């Protein structure tokens, strides 16, 4: 991973949306919340759900891909990374690669999973219990 993208991945991984998810998982575990409940954490609404495999409980945020891409672009600008002058295809490939890198970092260090969907959205999830 190039150095500037690595720095950007670290910046985005520390963003409030991911911190809220981590704190929300702690709140859900402490309160022994059941699937279907909604909690507030850091200005975000988190849903308590069964995990993807139906083996445990997780908290998740569903956010538009457009909003998440805007977050990345704002952080990229702060980091001095400019995608101006890039073709739509180049930008799309860079974003896909960035999301892959970010997903690996979040999974490895915070046990947060990112997956596409539903529709044009992104689902971001953290396990509460198994």
Image (cartoon, grey):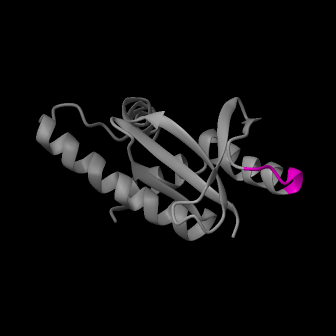
Q: What residue lies at 60% left-to-right and 46% top-to-bottom?
A: 60
Q: Which percent across, then down, holds residue 112? A: 57, 59
Left/right of residue 47 with respect to residue 96 in the rendered view: right
Q: What residue lies at 69% left-to-right and 48% top-to-bottom?
A: 35
Tell me which segment is drawn in magenta: 30-34
Badge count = 0
Left/right of residue 29 with respect to residue 71 in the rendered view: right
Q: Which percent across, then down, holds residue 14? A: 61, 49
Q: Is residue 55 magenta?
A: no
Q: What residue lies at 80% left-to-right and 49% top-to-bottom?
A: 33
Asked if residue 15 shows in the view, the reply is: no
Q: Quadrant of residue 126?
A: bottom right
Q: Which percent across, then down, holds residue 48? A: 68, 46
Main secondary structure type of the part rendered in magenta? loop
53, 93: nearer the viewer: 53
72, 6: nearer the viewer: 72
The quadrant of the image that shows the C terminus is bottom right
Asked if residue 105 shows in the view, the reply is: yes
122, 109: nearer the viewer: 122
105, 36: nearer the viewer: 36
Is residue 78 positioned above or below 117 on the image?
A: above
The quadrant of the image that shows the N terminus is bottom left
Is residue 26 positioned above or below 15 on the image?
A: below
Q: What residue lies at 73% left-to-right and 40% top-to-bottom?
A: 37
Q: Which percent across, then down, holds residue 109? A: 60, 67
């Amino acid at each position: 991973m190039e150095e500037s993208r690595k720095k950007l991945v670290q910046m985005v991984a520390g963003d409030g949306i991911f911190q809220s998810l981590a704190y929300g998982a702690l709140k859900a575990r402490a309160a022994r919340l059941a699937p279907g409940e909604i909690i507030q954490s850091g200005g975000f609404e988190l849903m308590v759900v069964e995990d993807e495999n139906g083996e445990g409980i997780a908290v998740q945020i569903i956010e538009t891909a457009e909003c998440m891409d805007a977050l990345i672009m704002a952080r990229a600008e702060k980091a001095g990374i400019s995608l101006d002058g890039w073709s739509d295809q180049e930008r799309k490939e860079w974003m896909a690669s960035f999301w892959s890198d970010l997903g690996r970092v979040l999974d490895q260090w915070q046990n947060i999973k990112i997956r596409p969907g539903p529709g044009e959205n992104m689902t971001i999830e953290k396990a509460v219990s198994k």
